[in-house]
Image (cartoon, rainbow, N blue to C red):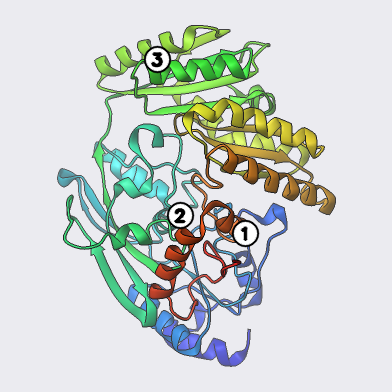
């Protein structure tokens, strides 16, 4: 960091809010670190209010310095990594709950408020904020909105976008714009709010968000089904759809994911388990009981075991296990490269088999798990993250995975975004006209190309 740059930024946010080289080091990385991705910021700044964010963006735009917004740093696509330098603008100190109206099922928070805090505040008042993308104590609402994060309960409740009624963002030149608000309906203008949601910091810096809440369900009843094969499990998932059932969550785990995590599974699993389905029925006590029985019936054919969980301890232990699956997989060889592909529902079985086939072709151990209800797979190549050779093998395998996913009519990212690590997939997924339209929107919001450059929408390759 140059002394001149530090001096200029410190004049806006104060000297303690501009980090020195040692303190700035963690801000050069995110959860893609095991893939060897790291950046080098020109400065790392921690503003404490919206006015400071506005002034920082204005200064950067005037001096043509790149701006890299950062939430909790839990992203899997390198979206918050300053790969091309610039100023990392961490929003962690914008952590105030500005308004909470439980009787109106709504909340306004600053971008740096942690996801877990919103969950707890809602729950303590008989409400529910359904998006649960993981790392709840580290991830922030601003980051969730910027990536349009999902999670296990997206099947019934939808992704983050469904729960955002308004937001405020700092855009070109330091202007603060307000899109939507505490309204539940608004079709007066073009839906610019939806453009900011999922834009990964490439159109502006999200600073405040209005969230919609819903009454918490009276009961939640998980249903677990173990199968001897992928084919039997996918047929069970198909029957859940065919019966017209809508559980809150509908998750799957293939043989590799089961093998990596079965030691921690509550009450154990049948020895022959090669595919696992976890569903959750919720609602009133009577409604949840009835739905759980119907889900169990739909999953029963071909299953080794179908189990309904009922006590708070069982439910807590199950979801603790679910949260730990990713860590258990990483522990197998010391690292992993995991891609969040999604395919049409009727191609889920093919996609699961495809992950195994690609791993065999590239000499890698694989597994997959994810949100079966959305056909969103965490397709994973297990590697020794310290081995450049294995990282390169996994990178090549991921490229093959993306090409074959698109051939199935799928997408290269169901919930993590493109960020930096998947930027080259943009022009593989979108045709020339669709890609040009998206780039024209980027140019309107950011004519100098300073908001998170190189991420999400890379320069045109055609």
Position in image of residue 14 (x %, y %): 45, 83
Q: Which one is earlier in the sequence, the residue at label 2 or at label 1? A: 2
Quarter of the image where one finds residue 154? top left
Q: Is residue 237 left or right of residue 396?
A: left
What is the spatial separation of the Cα atoms under label 1 and label 3, in whole angstroms? Answer: 40 Å
Cβ atoms under marks 1 and 3 closer than 8 Å: no
Front-most of residues 313 and 462 = 462
Residue matched to label 2: 147
Q: Is residue 43 left or right of residue 191?
A: right
Disc 1, SS:
helix
Where does the C terminus fall, quadrant-wise?
bottom right
- Number of other residues with Cα within 10 Å of mark 3, as a class: few under 14, some 14 to 19, many 20 or more: many
- Number of other residues with Cα within 10 Å of mark 1, as a class: few under 14, some 14 to 19, many 20 or more: some
Where does the N terminus fall, quadrant-wise?
bottom right
- Residue 267 visible? The answer is no
Front-most of residues 207 and 311 = 207
Residue matched to label 3: 295
- Residue 60 visible? The answer is yes
Mark linked to residue 300: none
Cβ atoms under marks 2 and 1 closer than 8 Å: no
Q: Residue at x 43, y 58 (%)?
A: 146
- Number of other residues with Cα within 10 Å of mark 2, as a class: few under 14, some 14 to 19, many 20 or more: many
Task: Examine the rendered structure and indicate whether residue 96 appears above or below residue 1.
Answer: above
Q: Residue at x 42, y 70 (%)?
A: 440
What is the spatial separation of the Cα atoms under label 2 and label 1, in whole angstroms? Answer: 18 Å
Quarter of the image where one finds residue 406? top right
Position in image of residue 331 (x %, y %): 72, 38
Front-most of residues 296 and 112 = 296
Task: Examine the rendered structure and indicate whether residue 170 appears above or below residue 133.
Answer: below
User: Given the current orientation, which residue lies at the most extreme bottom position?
Assistant: 4
Residue matched to label 1: 424
């Amino acid at each position: 960091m140059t002394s001149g740059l530090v001096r200029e930024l410190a004049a806006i946010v104060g000297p303690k809010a501009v980090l020195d080289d040692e303190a700035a080091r963690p801000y050069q990385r995110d959860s893609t670190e095991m893939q060897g991705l790291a950046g080098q910021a020109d400065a790392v700044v921690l503003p404490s209010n919206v006015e400071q964010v506005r002034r920082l963006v204005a200064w950067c735009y005037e001096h043509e310095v790149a701006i890299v917004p950062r939430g909790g740093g839990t992203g899997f696509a390198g979206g918050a990594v300053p790969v091309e330098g610039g100023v990392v603008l961490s929003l962690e100190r914008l952590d105030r709950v500005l308004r909470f109206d439980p009787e109106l099922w709504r909340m306004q928070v600053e971008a740096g408020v942690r996801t877990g805090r919103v969950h707890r505040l809602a729950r303590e008042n008989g409400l529910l904020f359904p998006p649960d993308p993981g790392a709840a104590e580290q991830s922030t609402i601003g980051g969730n909105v910027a990536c349009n994060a999902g999670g296990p309960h997206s099947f019934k409740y939808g992704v983050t976008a469904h729960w955002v009624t308004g937001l405020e963002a700092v855009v070109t030149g330091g202007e603060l714009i307000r899109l939507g608000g505490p309204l539940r309906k608004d079709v007066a203008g073009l839906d610019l709010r939806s453009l900011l949601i999922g834009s990964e910091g490439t159109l502006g810096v999200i600073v405040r968000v209005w969230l919609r809440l819903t009454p918490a369900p009276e009961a939640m009843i998980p249903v677990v089904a173990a199968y001897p094969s992928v084919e039997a499990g996918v047929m069970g998932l198909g029957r859940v759809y065919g019966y017209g059932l809508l559980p809150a969550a509908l998750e799957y785990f293939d043989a590799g994911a089961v093998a990596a995590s079965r030691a921690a599974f509550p009450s154990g699993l049948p020895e022959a388990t090669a595919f696992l389905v976890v569903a959750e029925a919720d609602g009133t006590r009577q409604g949840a009981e009835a739905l759980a029985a119907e889900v169990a019936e739909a999953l029963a054919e071909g299953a080794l075991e179908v189990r309904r969980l009922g006590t708070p301890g069982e439910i807590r232990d199950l979801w603790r296990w679910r949260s730990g699956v990713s860590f258990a997989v990483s522990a197998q060889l010391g690292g992993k490269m995991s891609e969040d592909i999604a395919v049409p529902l009727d191609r889920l079985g093919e996609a699961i088999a495809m992950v195994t086939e690609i791993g065999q072709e590239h000499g890698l151990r694989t597994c997959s798990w994810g949100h079966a209800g959305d056909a969103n797979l965490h397709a994973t190549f297990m590697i020794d993250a310290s081995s450049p050779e294995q990282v390169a093998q996994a990178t090549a395998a991921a490229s093959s995975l993306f090409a074959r996913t698109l051939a199935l009519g799928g997408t290269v990212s169901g919930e993590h975004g493109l960020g930096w690590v998947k930027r080259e997939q943009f022009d593989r997924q979108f045709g020339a006209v669709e890609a040009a339209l998206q780039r024209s929107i980027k140019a309107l919001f950011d004519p100098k190309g300073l908001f998170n450059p190189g991420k999400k929408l890379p320069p045109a390759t055609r």
